[in-house]
Image: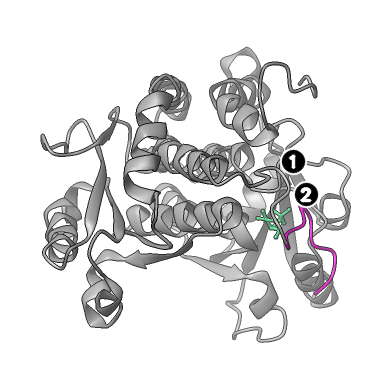
């Protein structure tokens, strides 16, 4: 991909816009001639494992959280998602046949590498999924898979996050098919990722609306909350991190049902509360939690889907399989973070105190 900014004011903005093309590139890479192609030995090793451990940091950890449901539903193998900086020094009692997946945009994160070094001493099987194909983590793991997001320059990760979820989905399908599971066979990941690409394009075309919402909700606000359940919760964590990273507005990502157990004390008049209503079985409960915040004065903004939408919802995502939906549903939050930061005059590509790749523990 072309590294010049062209008409863009920042790499973050350019990389957000590149996301539909990233999904198409991933499909081309993993489905040459329309056939899913991944190293068969790798698929067999994962299929033969009794537990998948996903290890990552930051935004990659958030992509790992979304991967959990994908792998569990499509492969029937239990999954644990671990923070690299915690896991390595506090290894839990591992299962008998574990398989480890490292998610890392850069492939150079020291926290993740430390875990890999520990696991290699224990002769465990490892895979790195990374955007940098000759990176340290790619070279040192038993297997590696490419993210194909193209170079990500902005410190705040956007396109690598959606690429990680897409590659997890493709891998989960491939492992599930290897195990002859009908849930995997009937999961049309190619179609879902193409639909996700169009859903993202539709959201990008609504940029002006999101810029307006950023001003309406965040001018004069120094604290915000993102809430949801299931993948909506994981989206809330990533949306909140994006806002913090580039706008410096304090924010928390919270499980919608947990807000009432303490954190709701922080809601004041006009505090922005962004709710993700993206899961059918918890949609009504989540709306109830958003309402609880609203009745304490919060200024609520709802991101929902066509199927779950109600007329007051400000941002509606095209319907997708619920496993794939986070790929599109994160985009309005990326744009919101970008516009809040831009209005505050921040350097969105190089936020204070942050580095693109952190090579110290
Ligand atoms: C740094 C970056 C984050 C990133 C994290 C993990 O803290 O600023 O954006 O999510 O590292 O990076 P990785 O390259 O391992 O995905």
Tell me if residue 153 comes above or below residue 3 in the rendering: below
Residue indicated by mark 2: 106
Q: Does 311 sit left or right of 316 as displayed?
A: left
Mark 2 surroundings within 10 Å by alpha-carbon count, few (fewer than 14), some (14 through 19), many (20 or more): many
The yes-or-no answer for disc 2 within 8 Å of ligand 1 is yes
Q: Which residues are magenta?
A: 353-361
Tell me if residue 47 comes above or below residue 171 in the rendering: below
Residue indicated by mark 1: 131
Q: Residue at (75%, 66%) from the top-left corner?
A: 112
Local secondary structure at mark 1:
loop
Local secondary structure at mark 2:
loop
Q: Are marks 1 and 2 in contact (CB under 8 Å)?
A: yes
Q: CA distance from mark 1 to mark 2?
A: 6 Å
Residue 7 placed where, x, y %? 67, 16
Task: Work out whether residue 141 or residue 16 is closer to the camera in this orientation and state it.
Answer: 16
Mark 1 surroundings within 10 Å by alpha-carbon count, few (fewer than 14), some (14 through 19), many (20 or more): many
Q: Residue at (59%, 41%) from the top-left corner?
A: 158
Residue 318 drawn in magenta: no
Q: Taking the image as four quarters, which one is ligand 1 found in?
A: bottom right
Q: Residue at (71%, 38%) from the top-left corner?
A: 39
Task: Work out whether residue 295 or residue 190 is closer to the camera in this orientation and state it.
Answer: 295
Task: Work out whether residue 138 or residue 242 is closer to the camera in this orientation and state it.
Answer: 242
Residue 178 placed where, x, y %? 54, 41
Task: Work out whether residue 89 or residue 121 is closer to the camera in this orientation and state it.
Answer: 89
Residue 360 drawn in magenta: yes
Quadrant, the N terminus: top right
The yes-or-no answer for disc 1 within 8 Å of ligand 1 is yes
Q: Does 132 sit left or right of 201 as displayed?
A: right
């Amino acid at each position: 991909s072309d590294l010049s900014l062209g008409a863009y004011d920042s790499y973050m903005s350019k990389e957000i816009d590149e996301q539909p093309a990233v999904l198409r590139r991933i499909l081309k890479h993993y489905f040459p001639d329309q056939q899913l192609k991944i190293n068969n030995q790798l698929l067999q090793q994962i299929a033969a494992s009794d537990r998948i451990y996903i290890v990552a940091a930051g935004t990659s950890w958030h992509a790992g959280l979304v991967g959990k449901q994908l792998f569990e539903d499509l492969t029937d193998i239990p999954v644990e998602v671990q923070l690299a900086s915690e896991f390595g020094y506090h290894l839990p009692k591992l299962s008998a046949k574990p398989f480890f997946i490292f998610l890392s945009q850069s492939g150079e994160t020291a926290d993740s590498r430390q875990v890999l070094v520990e696991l290699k001493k224990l002769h465990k099987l490892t895979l790195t999924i990374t955007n940098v194909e000759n990176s340290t983590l790619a070279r040192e793991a038993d297997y590696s898979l490419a993210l194909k997001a193209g170079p990500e320059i902005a410190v705040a990760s956007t396109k690598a996050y959606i690429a990680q979820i897409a590659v997890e989905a493709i891998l989960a399908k491939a492992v599930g098919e290897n195990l002859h599971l009908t849930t995997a066979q009937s999961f049309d990941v190619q179609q879902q990722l193409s639909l996700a690409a169009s859903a993202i394009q539709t959201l990008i075309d609504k940029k002006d609306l999101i810029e307006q919402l950023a001003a309406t909700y965040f001018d004069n606000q120094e604290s915000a909350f993102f809430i949801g359940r299931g993948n909506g919760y994981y989206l809330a964590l990533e949306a909140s991190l994006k806002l913090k990273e580039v706008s410096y507005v304090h924010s928390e990502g919270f499980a919608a049902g947990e807000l009432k157990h303490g954190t709701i004390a922080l809601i004041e008049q006009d505090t922005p509360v962004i709710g993700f209503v993206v899961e059918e079985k918890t949609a009504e409960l989540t709306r109830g939690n958003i309402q609880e915040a609203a009745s304490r004065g919060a200024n609520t903004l709802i991101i929902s889907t066509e199927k779950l939408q109600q007329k007051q919802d400000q941002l509606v995502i095209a319907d997708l399989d619920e496993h794939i939906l986070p790929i599109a549903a994160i985009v309005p939050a990326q744009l919101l973070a970008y516009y809040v930061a831009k209005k505050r005059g921040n350097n969105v590509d190089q936020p204070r105190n942050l580095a693109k790749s952190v090579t110290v523990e």
